[in-house]
Image (cartoon, coloured by chain):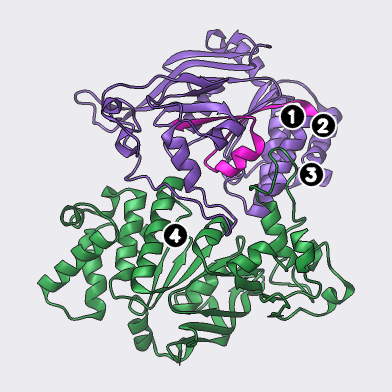
Chain colours: A green, B purple
């Protein structure tokens, strides 16, 4: 088996804030293989978007600084590339889509021209070739009457359609990696179903690797192959979706799954609650960041921050007292 | 059977849109003939996608918006026949909790002032008595008495939602209309607020009209569920029956589109074509027919009325029961 297309090793990204330095992402390791979808889940402020933006070096510096780590893509460390070299990667080999399509669509240009522009930045095609490619892309993402829609401005399209246009733009140069940051969060559930279906189809067709960032465990269960759970800027558990949903080993993962109304909960019964809230990352306490909310914390949890290590059951877990498989299934 | 606490009949509301004053302005039909009952102590869930009219319906139910037509009965009194003073008296017993805990609290009022505002307006408690009541309400919703002197920006999203709930509880209502109360919260905080709503219902015998786009959350709280599409209720019935055997193709598609947090369950997603049509010019016949995978010729011309297909289970579909 070949190595990962994209690998993050010990990534640490901090922000300078009036209250001091805030490490939003710390010692994050992730591997993404060709053709797979890796779900990155976690709650607000856990560092999932900062991770994505760090990969593409899209964070404004300052206040952000990528302080440590490597981001290996096709054998090169993206953190060592010049700005010029990075421009060849961004939107070309690695593309990104966002929750809000207007993040990358310009309201005053026709959508067809914007897609054409995304192509022209990386490829020299004749005008006719480029126009043909734009129509092909619009058709690919399921936009009917592409010739007509290409002449529309973003505001003339519905939310779902704008999301499709953004996806067409991201795919314009056949990227090896697609980073999707909460791509369906702003959409209604029936439109979300359309977009998820589209992403799955495109991924199979082009054997893209997809880094799917979401807060929705349901989306991960349905769309991802593997999963990394982030808490307070660290990966606390990673493994295959099947492994983790069947037997979550980090108490935070277990807590998140139990907090969700699902087929496992009975209507009207009390849901599992994770007490307290995420710690302040500026003055992060020593030891495990989750320990103050954890029902399984031991004395050691206050002393040392657990490393992300292989657990007997196959996944990686950063916990001194992980939930055993027998307990998780009970 | 006891009479409903809240009874909505043929409620209608449209809004003028666009236009510059010349000729006829288009009207957006937000709520188009809705009937709905909520009994004492029960939770009725109301689901639907953006623009289906669920939030407008919530505001009409409390007469925060004036309906164009229809009746609203609360505790067996016709709310539309009441004068301002009488209406204000009734409002004590019907409260609302909003989605956005950031926008729905006044940033210049302390938590205590926010919670006690209703008591002050209704002249219910003063001075030390009011303070005691605020402390009690804070404790009921899981906050500390000293939180009373803090301002909204000092609280997290979940805590703000607790303040919103304490404000609604202050006047001892019988009905709380909760409009997407957990939609902006993270999963672990969402669970805390849902538990709180369940506890309060048990403790005070509250009835909820619980509005959400999240079908999983609605299922967890509601005994009966109504599904809205383009301003109309298309299906209404007991939660178990509606989720187990939906009787409207829209409900079926909506349920199938919800991602299930269980990778061993591979279910068939029904992907509806296209977007929700504009409520300014809704399609003729059944408003769902252009997207319906089961539509027949008749659906394009005849509007289906709600009819009972099982005990207390109604649907507006020509083809039901399924």
- Residue pointed to by mark 2: B133
Q: Are marks 1 and 2 on the same chain?
A: yes
* A195 relative position to B210: left or right: left
- Residue pointed to by mark 1: B170
**B131 vs A114, nearest the viewer:** A114
B212 magenta-colored? yes
Which chain letter matches label 4?
A
The percent position of residue B14, horizontal first and vertical second, equals 38, 24
Query: Could you say which disc has been placed on residue A183 in the image?
Result: 4
Label located before the other in sequence (3 or 2) = 2
Q: Nearer the viewer, mark 3 or mark 1?
A: 3
What's the residue at 50%, 72% (across, down)?
Answer: A52
Q: Are marks 4 and 2 on the same chain?
A: no
- As measured in the structure, the alpha-carbon distance from the residue carrying label 3 to the one carrying label 2 is 14 Å
Looking at the image, is B198 positioned above or below residue A93?
Answer: above
Q: Nearer the viewer, mark 4 or mark 3?
A: 4
Circles 4 and 3, Cβ within 8 Å, touching? The answer is: no
- As measured in the structure, the alpha-carbon distance from the residue carrying label 4 to the one carrying label 3 is 34 Å
């Amino acid at each position: 088996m070949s190595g990962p297309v994209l690998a993050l090793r010990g990534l640490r990204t901090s922000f300078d804030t009036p209250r001091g330095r805030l490490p939003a992402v710390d010692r994050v390791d992730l591997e993404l293989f060709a053709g797979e979808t890796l779900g990155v889940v976690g709650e607000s402020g856990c560092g999932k978007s900062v991770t994505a933006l760090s990969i593409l070096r899209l964070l404004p510096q300052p206040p952000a600084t990528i302080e440590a780590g490597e981001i290996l893509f096709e054998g090169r460390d993206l953190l060592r590339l010049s700005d010029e070299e990075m421009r060849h990667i961004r939107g070309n080999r690695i593309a990104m889509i966002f929750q809000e399509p207007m993040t990358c669509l310009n309201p005053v240009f026709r959508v067809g021209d914007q897609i054409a522009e995304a192509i022209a930045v990386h490829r020299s095609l004749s005008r006719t070739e480029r126009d043909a490619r734009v129509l092909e892309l619009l058709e690919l993402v399921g936009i009917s009457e592409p010739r007509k829609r290409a002449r529309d401005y973003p505001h003339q399209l519905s939310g779902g359609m704008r999301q499709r246009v953004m996806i067409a733009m991201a795919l314009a140069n056949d990227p090896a990696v697609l980073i999707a940051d909460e791509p369906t969060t702003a959409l209604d559930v029936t439109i979300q179903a359309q977009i998820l279906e589209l992403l799955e189809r495109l991924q199979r067709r082009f054997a893209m690797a997809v880094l799917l960032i979401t807060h929705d465990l349901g989306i991960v269960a349905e769309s991802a192959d593997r999963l990394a759970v982030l808490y307070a800027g660290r990966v606390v558990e990673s493994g295959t979706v099947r492994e983790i949903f069947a037997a979550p080993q980090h108490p935070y993962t277990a807590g998140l799954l139990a907090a969700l109304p699902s087929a496992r909960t009975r209507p009207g019964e009390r849901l599992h609650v994770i007490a307290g809230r995420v710690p302040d990352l500026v003055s992060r306490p020593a030891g495990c960041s989750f320990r103050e909310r954890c029902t399984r914390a031991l004395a050691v949890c206050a002393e040392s921050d657990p490393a992300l290590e292989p657990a007997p059951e196959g996944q990686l877990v950063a916990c001194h007292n992980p939930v055993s498989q027998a307990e998780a299934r009970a | 059977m006891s009479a409903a606490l809240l009874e909505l009949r043929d409620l209608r509301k449209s809004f003028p849109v666009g236009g510059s004053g010349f000729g006829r302005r288009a009207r957006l039909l937000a709520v188009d003939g809705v009937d709905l009952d909520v009994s004492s102590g029960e939770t009725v869930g109301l689901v639907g996608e953006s623009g289906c009219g669920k939030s407008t319906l919530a505001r009409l139910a409390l007469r925060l918006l004036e309906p164009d037509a229809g009746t609203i009965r609360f505790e067996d009194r016709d709310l539309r026949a009441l004068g301002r003073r009488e209406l204000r008296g009734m409002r004590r017993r019907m409260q609302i909790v909003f989605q956005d805990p950031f926008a729905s609290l006044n940033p210049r009022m302390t938590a205590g002032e926010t919670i006690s505002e209703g008591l002050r307006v209704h002249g219910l408690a003063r001075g030390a008595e009011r303070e005691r009541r605020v402390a009690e309400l804070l404790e009921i919703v899981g906050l500390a008495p000293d939180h009373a002197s803090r301002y909204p920006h000092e609280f997290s999203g979940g805590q703000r939602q607790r303040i919103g709930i304490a404000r609604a509880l202050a006047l001892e209502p019988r009905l709380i209309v909760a409009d997407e109360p957990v939609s902006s919260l993270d999963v672990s905080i969402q669970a805390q607020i849902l538990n709180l709503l369940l506890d309060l219902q048990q403790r005070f015998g509250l009835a909820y009209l619980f509005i959400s786009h999240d079908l999983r959350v609605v299922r967890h709280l509601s005994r009966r569920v109504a599904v809205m599409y383009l301003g109309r209720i298309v299906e209404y019935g007991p939660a178990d029956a509606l989720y187990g055997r939906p009787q409207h193709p829209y409900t079926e598609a909506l349920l199938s589109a919800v991602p299930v947090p269980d990778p061993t369950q591979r279910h068939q997603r029904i992907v509806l074509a296209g977007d929700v049509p504009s409520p300014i010019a809704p399609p003729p016949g059944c408003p769902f027919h252009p997207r319906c995978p089961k539509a027949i010729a008749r659906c394009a011309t005849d509007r289906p009325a709600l009819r009972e297909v099982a005990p207390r289970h109604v649907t507006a579909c020509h083809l039901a029961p399924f």
